[in-house]
Amino acid sequence: MTAHTPALDLLAPDQRGILIGGSWREADSGDRFEVIDPADGSVITTVADASAGEAIEALDAAVAAQRSWSRTPPRERGEILRTAFELVTARADEFAALMSLEMGKTVAEARGEVAYGIEFFRWYAEEAVRIHGRYMQAPAGGSRLLTLKKPVGPCLFVTPWNFPLAMGTRKIGPAIAAGCTMVVKPAHQTPLTMLALAGVLAEAGLPDGVLNIVPTTDAAGVSEALMADDRLRKVSFTGSTGIGKVLVRQSAEQLLRVSMELGGNAPFLVFEDADVDAAVDGAMLAKMRNMGEACTAANRFLVHRSVAAEFAEKLGKRMGALTVGRGQDDGVDVGPLIDEKAVESVSQLVTDAIHDGATVVCGGQAPDGPGFFYPPTVLLDVPAESAINAEEIFGPVAPITTFDTEEEAVARANDTEYGLSSYAYTRDLARTIRLAESLDYGMVGINTGLVSNPAAPFGGVKASGFGREGGFEGIEEYLETTYVNLPAG
């Protein structure tokens, strides 16, 4: 146990376990796993390690609660979400401290995630009462056509470690609004924030069994057992494309409704007419959010040759001036990466890029000492074929590759299997329209380094997945349509 225990105050001792049907419990095996502080590798606490058996019991609870929950008035479901929004907002500092401790991001950035993540509860509190069908006369007359929207049913949510609150709220929010029950499997690296959120939802009045949580180190076994059960009706996953493909294959057996938010390889285009200072500001947002450990992070910087040197110099000064350290310490701008494997992966990509001919503007080498740290790094003149331009970096590294024409920039931007987010800086309105239409991405940010918004549909194309979270579109992922034919007389 570390000395940073005040951050655990959101969690009662029994709340570091498995939540099934409104009760916290230990694993039948008695097994627990360690949650590690990435700033120094120490053990924060331990959490009950669920097995496939406990996962099925969690689904039992979700199934048992589904019918009564689906009949709960929409206004009541919305008020639960609204109350939870207010409770988390009032405890934002506590949630931020807990998130910073288990994931590594700075407390300031964690506060930003709390504000962003909990907005999904407020948004879907308002959408719960706006679920509607339609009524119309059949074109040929003689009957009336009625459509109804019904909840999909029990869901499985598999959430990642990089945004412990937001990746849960943007699934849980619309599911509650639509009238679905759920089993949530948080990432084993960062389960504590989700466990704390479950306590708040119970306090807000969420009935037992609607939300069940199975922290586990056996993600594959737990997910496979749940998806083989024909009572499960939907799975929503945020994580790597490789795991996403496995889950999609497994989902086919039960013909589950599926939402997949997978990997990214976001291009950040800077054209010759761009406001370079504004582009640097946007790059800091698009690259350094969450230490670069985000699927929406700018991964490839494609910069017009005429402004590449200026952009690299200014970005290098900004990145090089950032302070790296423990996320809970004052004055720290960049926390640790999630684990040693992440540091090794980022280091290898940078080493390979330098070997390929890239120039180091700042950073470029992991420091000695405890913790999983990597310095903010800018690389110039990275060859287009370098591995760092093909793989998701998931770290604070900005590789810059130059281009000469718009056509070349767009071709390079689209030359990837991924299609989640993209960014472009230009002051040409006609070019803006062309880019919006020609970039093969689910999200395009023009003259901004931030695209995520609870009121907008978040999601990608190609190997970045399918389905949308957030916006008006997000709740449709949790609703089925029933058509009723009514005789006219």
Image: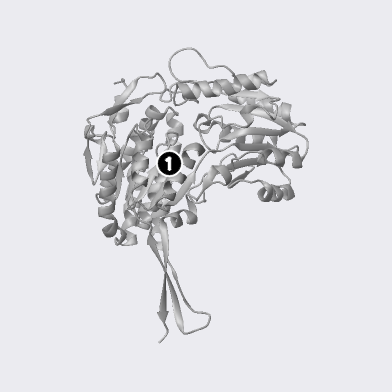
The percent coordinates of residue 166 (x first, y second) are 43, 41
Residue at the spot 38% in from the left edge and 48% down from the top edge? 172
Instruction: Give above or below for 393 relative to 55.
Output: above
Query: Residue 347 occupies which quadrant of the picture?
Result: top right
Visible residue check, residue 86? no
**Around disc 1, counting alpha carbons within 10 Å, would you say few (fewer than 14), some (14 to 19), or many (20 or more)?**
many
Quadrant showing the C terminus: bottom left
Residue placed most toward the observer, 60 or 438: 60
Left or right: where 320 falls relative to 244: right
* 409, 363: nearer the viewer: 409
In the displayed orientation, state which residue is furthest to the front. 253
Question: Could you tell me which secondary element the residue under label 1 belongs to?
Answer: helix
Which quarter of the image is occupied by the N terminus?
top left
Per the image, the residue denoted by label 1 is: 166
Q: Quadrant of residue 426?
A: top right
Q: How many marks?
A: 1
The location of residue 279, given as percent across then percent down, is 65, 35
Decide if residue 266 is in sight here. Answer: yes
- The location of residue 399, given as percent across then percent down, is 64, 27
Left or right of residue 409, residue 134 in this image: left
Q: Is 61 located above or below residue 382 in the figure? A: below
Q: Residue at x 38, y 23 (%)?
A: 37
What type is the residue that disc 1 sits on?
Ala
> On screen, 390 above or below 232?
above
Residue at the spot 51% in from the left edge and 29% down from the top edge: 291
Classify residue 243 as left or right of residue 463: left
Question: Residue 173 at what x, y percent from top left?
Answer: 39, 50
Q: Residue furthest bottom?
A: 489
User: Which residue does the image show at 37% across and 46% down from the upper left?
Assistant: 227
| Relative depth, front residue between 153 and 326 | 153
